[in-house]
């Protein structure tokens, strides 16, 4: 993945405006928290293949941390803490944030086709 270029990512987000797309979104601190602190509790969100249509997209922030909002007819999809992105071989926009040890903290992925269901 590459460090986010705000202008490029904004353009990629706009490529999907007013189209039906599939969203994968995930946040986690997983076992990272409880592994280092037995009093910590794990939190996470996992959404895969949510079919949405958004009509506005914004990326805001700076090189330390960006946030992305996708405005739908009924509300917002929002991810914060992203720092890297790539366009994969299938043309999907993959955006993520990792901690200093390279562990995934947040991801927002957008595709014209459903993501594979992996078990």
Image (cartoon, grey):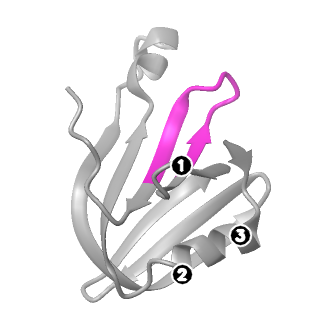
Q: Is residue 115 left or right of residue 62?
A: left
Q: Quadrant of residue 116?
A: top left
Tell me which numbered mark, 2 or 1, is placed earlier along the sequence.
2
Residue located beneath label 1 in the image: 88
Residue at 20%, 26% in the rendered image = 119
Q: Secondary structure at mark 2?
A: helix
Question: In this orientation, which residue lies closer to the viewer: 95 or 42?
Answer: 95
Residue 32 counted in the magenta span = no
User: CA separation, marks 3 and 1?
Assistant: 15 Å
- Front label number (3 vs 1): 1
Residue 59 visible here: no
Residue positioned most to the right: 63
User: CA separation, marks 2 and 3?
Assistant: 10 Å
Q: Quadrant of the N terminus?
A: top right
User: CA separation, marks 2 and 1?
Assistant: 17 Å
Q: Is residue 58 above or below residue 106?
A: below
Residue 62 visible here: yes
Residue 47 x/y as whole percent:
26, 50
Residue located beneath label 2 in the image: 14
Q: Which residues are magenta?
A: 95-108
Q: Is residue 54 above or below residue 26?
A: below
Residue 97 counted in the magenta span = yes
Q: Secondary structure at mark 1?
A: loop
Residue located beneath label 3 in the image: 8
Q: Is residue 24 left or right of residue 102?
A: left
């Amino acid at each position: 993945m590459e460090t986010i270029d705000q202008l490029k990512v904004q353009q990629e987000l706009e490529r999907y405006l007013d189209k039906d797309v599939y969203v994968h979104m995930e946040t986690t601190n997983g076992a990272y928290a409880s592994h280092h602190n037995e009093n910590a509790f794990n939190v996470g969100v996992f959404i895969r293949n949510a079919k949405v249509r958004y009509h506005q997209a914004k990326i805001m922030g700076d090189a330390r941390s960006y946030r992305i909002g996708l405005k739908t007819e009924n509300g917002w999809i929002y991810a914060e803490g992203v720092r890297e992105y790539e366009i994969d071989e299938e043309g999907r926009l993959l955006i993520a944030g990792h901690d200093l040890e390279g562990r995934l903290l947040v991801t927002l992925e957008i595709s014209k086709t459903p993501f594979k269901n992996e078990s």
